[in-house]
Amino acid sequence: MKIDADAAGFDPKRLERITEHLARRYIEPQKISGCQTAVVRHGEVGYFSSLGSMDLERGRPVREDTIWRIYSMTKPITGVALMTLYERGHFQLGDPVHRFIPEWNDLKVAERQPDGSTRLVEAERPMSVGDALMHMTGLGWGVD
């Protein structure tokens, strides 16, 4: 892979701080076993690094061709799409979600009772687009 920080418009010494940060804050304290990072601008790769292990048990380091299983990638893609619409003025972060999904008007929320059970009550306010972007909708996989 061709890496050219100058062609991408970056200072290579400043980009190397990414490696230092990830190694010190995540790899060395074993918060994550390994990672790959790329910084690309205008089609030019300005920075790329492979750090840590792709297989801790076998002591195999992360390589340039490591295959990663990545889950829940719809969240950042949806977030970028929504923020693009936000930049264009199509909505405000405080807008209620039911403006776009009318069926979600007057949603109830679960309130835990002293005995551990739950009951549905009126929400204090409607769910906003900002709530959804911050994963604070209260939507779950079901009531306990």
Image (cartoon, rainbow, N blue to C red):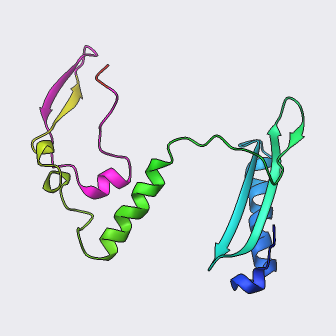
Quadrant into which the C terminus falls: top left
- Residue 41 falls in which quadrant of the image? bottom right
Taking the image as shown, residue 74 lies to the left or right of residue 93, namely: right
Residue at the spot 68% in from the left edge and 69% down from the top edge:
39
Locate the N terminus and report the quarter of the image it occupies: bottom right
Looking at the image, which residue is at 13% across and 31% down? 121
Quarter location, residue 85: bottom left
Q: In which quarter of the image is residue 43?
A: bottom right
Looking at the picture, how far across and down is residue 79, in whole percent?
41, 58
The one nearer the camera, 127 or 40, is: 40
What residue occupies the far top of the structure in this picture?
Answer: 115
Image coordinates for residue 19, horizontal then vertical, percent:
79, 63
Between 87 and 130, the residue placed more toward the observer is 87
| Total numbered labels placed on residues in the image | 0
129 left or right of 123? right
Residue 131 colored in magenta in the image: yes
Residue 136 magenta-drawn?
Answer: yes
Dominant SS of magenta comes to loop
In this rendered view, identify the residue nearer to me: 114 or 63.
Answer: 63
Q: Position of residue 84 (x, y in %)?
A: 37, 70
Q: Where is residue 31 in the image (x, y as percent from the top left)?
A: 71, 42
The residue positioned 70% from the left and 82% from the top of the image is 8
Residue under the point 35% across and 62% down: 82
Is 112 placed left or right of 73 in the picture?
left
Residue 57 against residue 106 in the figure, above or below? above
- Relative to 22, residue 9 above or below: below
Magenta region, residue range: 113-141
Using the image as rendered, state which of residue 9 and residue 1 is in the foreground.
Answer: 1
